[in-house]
Amino acid sequence: MRVIVAQAMGYCFGVKEALELADELADPTRVTIYGELVHNEEVQSRLAARGYVAMSETGRLIPATPAVMVTAHGISERERRKLLAAGKELIDTTCPLVRRVHRQAEKLRDEGYFLVVIGKSGHVEVRGIVGDLERYAVVERPQDVHFFTPGRLAVICQTTTAPASVGPILRQIEAAHPGQEVRFVDTICKPTRDRQNAAQSLLNRVQALVVVGGKNSNNTRALAQMARDRGIACWHVQTAADLDPAWFEPFRGQAVGLTAGTSTPDGVIRGVYDFLLDLASKYQGRPAA
């Protein structure tokens, strides 16, 4: 068994900056993280061990701590004003590329467009994007599209949207609104695009794929879905502890790929890589069952 790694995988700069800021704070016990700083369970455990107070991403109330850390996924200006009005100190780790989507949404709103956001309905990033909009729709698949409005439409994306999913959705929107203006602004972030492109290239060279990342990570799930869409065996795991050697028995003489989502720590990726290398070395010289 050969192990081939993707050319681009793991932490993006936005996640790195958020975690560096969290690691630098002297007194985490006075801070509530307003949701999940990043969608990775190992990172959340590490932050909890340092003393950070955790808050669910759904049904959020005003935290009791004096300071609130806004996660890399961002929040709406409406939510921000609510926290400030409650006297909270805001420690903002919003990814700059998420901020860009917010600015684009506000600009298009002010120009009179009805906003269509391609993304996962209910995802914390999407909730932040639409939180300051009055007229909008969120679509995840072409079948989610219907007639939205007789006016002008503008289409933007959640930053971690799979690039390949955009074209079919956009065509469906145009078909549902014949003769109307449909303006598309591509707001998928470069780290997501780089990891998707690297995974596509990797899938041309392997017979199976391991994707490492949090179970709630949108971009990690998208990487796994790419493999499944091509009929390639794929396992989405959070750490090496989730791996089962029996999965790889059919691939002893073949190539297994490794990639990871943008919120996956380097150490976690290394643990999975070492597991696969160790398994591959054990297979050498042993006949397949």
Image: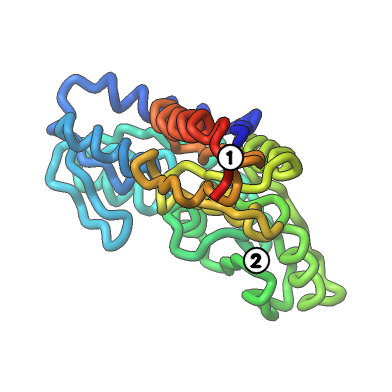
Q: Is residue 117 visible?
A: yes
Residue 253 or residue 211, whichever sits in front: 253
Q: Quadrant of the N terminus?
A: top right
- Quarter-of-image position of residue 41: top left
Q: Amino acid at mark 2?
A: Phe
Residue beneath disc 2:
114
How dense is the environment of label 2, judged by Cα within 10 Å: few (below 14), some, or many (20 and up)? many
Q: Position of residue 23 (x, y in %)?
A: 28, 23
In the picture shown, does residue 14 fall above or below 58?
Answer: above
Is 21 positioned to the left or the right of 202 in the image? left
Residue 99 or residue 42, whichever sits in front: 42
Q: Amino acid at mark 1?
A: Arg
Residue beneath disc 1:
100
Q: Position of residue 224 (x, y in %)?
A: 57, 52
Is 211 positioned to the left or the right of 243 in the image? right
Query: For the residue labelled by badge 1, is the local secondary structure a helix, a strand or a loop?
Result: helix
Q: Earlier in the sequence, mark 1 or mark 2?
A: 1
In the picture shown, does residue 225 fall above or below 173?
Answer: above
